[in-house]
Image (spheres, grey):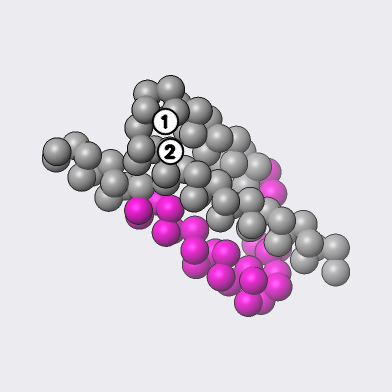
Amino acid sequence: MEKEFFGYFAAILTTVAFLPQLIKTLKTKKADDVSLITLIMFIIGVLSWIIYGYKISSLPILAANSITLILNLLILISKIYFSRK
């Protein structure tokens, strides 16, 4: 039970950590300060975590990284969209 607590706690913190960046990007309509290469590398890493979580049947890993993937894809889309304006 204790190790599951830390899994869910880590999942919540690491997922929610991207909300401020997404909110700032959408409010300012700028993402110049977000590194495209870092963002792409992170998204690939998150996809790898999703595959790993699926293979070991870990709900905390799957849930957190799926949400994190969505948030970071939104940041990536915003970065590309706002850089074209």
Q: Position of residue 43 (x, y in %)?
A: 59, 41
**Residue at 42%, 30% in the rendered image:** 53
Does dot 1 land on a helix, a strand or a loop? helix
Type of the residue with mark 2: Leu
**Residue at 35%, 32% in the rendered image:** 58
Q: Position of residue 81 (x, y in %)?
A: 78, 62
Q: Main secondary structure of the magenta part?
A: helix
Q: Which residues are magenta?
A: 12-37
Q: How far apart are the two marked residues, 1 and 2, measured between alpha carbons?
A: 5 Å
Judge left or right: residue 6 versus residue 37: left
Q: Nearer the viewer, residue 35 or 48?
A: 48
Quadrant position of the C terminus in the picture: bottom right
Q: Residues within 10 Å of mark 2 (few under 14, many from 20)?
A: many
Residue underneath mark 2: 62
Q: Residue furthest bottom?
A: 27
- Look at the image and tell me whether residue 35 can be seen: no
Q: Position of residue 6 (x, y in %)?
A: 23, 43
Judge left or right: residue 53 versus residue 32: left
Q: Residues within 10 Å of mark 1 (few under 14, many from 20)?
A: some
Residue 5 position (above or below residue 55): below
**Residue at 50%, 44% in the rendered image:** 66
Q: Residue furthest left?
A: 2
Marker disc for residue 29: none
Are the residues at dot 1 and dot 2 in contact (C-beta closer than 8 Å)? yes
Judge left or right: residue 59 versus residue 28: left
Res 1 → quadrant: top left
Marker disc for residue 53: 1
Does dot 2 land on a helix, a strand or a loop? helix
Residue 1 position (above or below residue 68): above
Judge whether residue 48 is colored magenta. Answer: no
Q: Position of residue 78 (x, y in %)?
A: 70, 61
Q: Nearer the viewer, residue 28 or 61?
A: 61
